[in-house]
Amino acid sequence: MAEPTTHTLETDGATLRYDVRPGTGTDPRPLLLIGSPMDATGFTTLASHFADRTVVTYDPRGVGRSETAEGAPVEILPEEHADDLARLIEALDAGPADVFASSGGAVNSLALVARRSELVHTLVAHEPPAAGIVPDGAEALAACEAVRAAYLEDGLGAGMARFIALVSHEGPIPADWADLPVPPPEAFGLPAGDDGRRDDPLLGRNMRGCTSYVPDTEALKAAAATTRIVVAAGEESREQLAARAGAALADRLGSPLAVFPSHHGGFLGGEFGQQGAPEEFAKALRAVLEG
């Protein structure tokens, strides 16, 4: 696969950096691989399986190489990310894009399609953690608030330990989830101390806006005139919150849930120390994009 070239894009309140990998095939439509708050490095393995496509990855605002303007609010909303994505696709000047978006990136891409569907040909929204739309939405949102409370009170290690416990929980979230014990930060290789910072890209900047976002199902249904939307979940994570939210969204849209190999990070090939099944995942994604 060709080496990526890095570009800079000024948007409202942020400077974005994105990478373009030219493809060897004839399909002119770019394929965007999007996460949040994960940066472009998380898609290195998956991109390598699409050498025939022009693949675009980027660092969302406030993450990695992309900066927010001085004085910008700490918390970032999906609508802001959606505006960034719209400007990015317009900057590519290559017509509507195919988009694979995972986790928070899926939430942001759903916000994009609800507002600017003409920019997206096919959206594969993989496990969007829209906690409020699961049947136990009130309990799920309360659990997300408990994660944030742990972070604000005791720092990154405590917050991430509770976050990991939440995202790996199988089945409905109990009403007393915040009172349940969780392993100490050290059990996950996290720092036990508090460095005093509260601007972590996940817990401090994106989690609350992402998990509380309610997809505009009417706008998404109307977008079907221009955009094909496929909601997906991992076969190993189907009872976890993000996958259950994906299933709930597919049900609201009246469409089947696409089941992909592996888990929430099934496309990872060792990035961030996590291993999925990237080859099988890429085959499943290609089949959906070509379907």
Image (cartoon, rainbow, N blue to C red):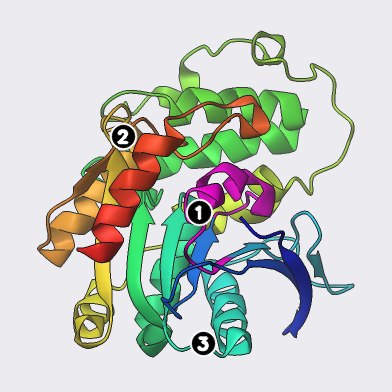
Query: Which residue sits at x=39%, y=46%?
Result: 282
Task: Report the front residue among 244 and 125.
Answer: 125
Q: Amino acid at mark 3?
A: Ala
Residue where numbered disc 3 is placed: 94
User: Can the viewer see residue 23 in this picture?
Assistant: yes
In space, the residues marked 2 and 3 are separated at their CA atoms by 30 Å
Q: Earlier in the sequence, mark 3 or mark 1?
A: 3
Residue where numbered disc 1 is placed: 104
Q: Specify few, some or many for label 1: CA neighbours under 10 Å numbering under 14, 14-19, or 20 or more.
A: many
Q: Are marks 2 and 1 in contact (CB under 8 Å)?
A: no
Magenta span of residues: 35-55
Task: Report the front residue among 151 and 16.
Answer: 16
Q: Specify few, some or many for label 2: CA neighbours under 10 Å numbering under 14, 14-19, or 20 or more.
A: many
Question: Image quarter for residue 151?
Answer: top right
Q: Are marks 3 and 1 in contact (CB under 8 Å)?
A: no
Can you say which quadrant of the picture contains the N terminus?
A: bottom right
In space, the residues marked 3 and 1 are separated at their CA atoms by 25 Å
Residue 266 sits above or below residue 33 on the image: above
